[in-house]
Amino acid sequence: MKLIGLTGTSGSGKGFVAALFAERGIDSIDTDSVVHRLYREDAECIAALETAFGPLQDGSGAIDRRRLAGIVFANKEKLSALNAIVHRFVKREVERICREKELTGCRFLLLDAPQLYEAGMESVCYRVIAVTAPESLRLNRICGRDHIDCVSAEQRIRNQHSDAFFEARADFVIRNDGIASVEAQVDRIMGELEYD
């Protein structure tokens, strides 16, 4: 099985791109969903986060993501500490899912991972696809998706790598700018993967 990294900044449209690949028969692991599940269900992960950042559980026993975001997004050192904790648990879960998929005869699997490089997971990927988009579009998407104001969305973007960072490291780049056809770009990559 070949694991294909899918990465880029928040609001660039990675989920949309993953859905287009799914329509073409390539499933994905959404690491954001993996993190949310860990925050709800993994007692070891929850304990590690509370050791680092203090009480974070909501009434259901899950990590209160808004509270955690308020702590880490304004402080790069705390954000780095969060990533160091969470990446370890995400890697373990991704490895488990990959083993299961491989047993089903899966040929290609997307790893939708905004923090692919920070987690060092590009090293296990056959190829990496970066999705980029203009900042104005990303801001609108983040505000609408996460129900936050523009200042908070801008703060998130400032804590992430630039499009140039992703473009320099990826094997393929999909520009989701509302002008170029994203579907055509996905089809081109699909063709190259089939014959690679």
Image: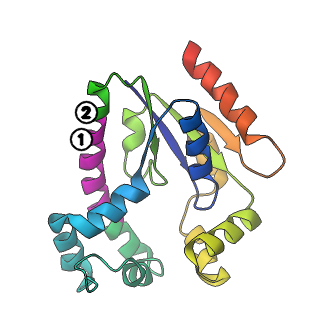
Whole-percent x, y for residue 165 in the image: 60, 50
- Rendered image: mark on residue 99: 2
| Residue in the picture at 39% in, 83% down | 71
At mark 1, the secondary structure is helix
Whole-percent x, y for residue 144 in the image: 64, 73
Identify the image quadrant of residue 1: top left
| Residue in the picture at 27% in, 69% down | 40
Identify the image quadrant of residue 83: bottom left
Give the camera-side residue of 49 and 27.
27
| Residue in the picture at 25% in, 55% down | 89
Q: Are marks 1 and 2 in contact (CB under 8 Å)?
A: yes
> What is the residue that sits farthest to the top in this orientation?
195
At mark 2, the secondary structure is helix
Q: Amino acid at mark 1?
A: Arg
Q: Quadrant of the C terminus?
A: top right
Residue stretch in magenta: 83-99
Residue identified by numbered label 1:
96
Residue 196, visible in the rendered structure: no
Q: Amino acid at mark 2?
A: Arg
Whole-percent x, y for residue 37 in the image: 31, 62
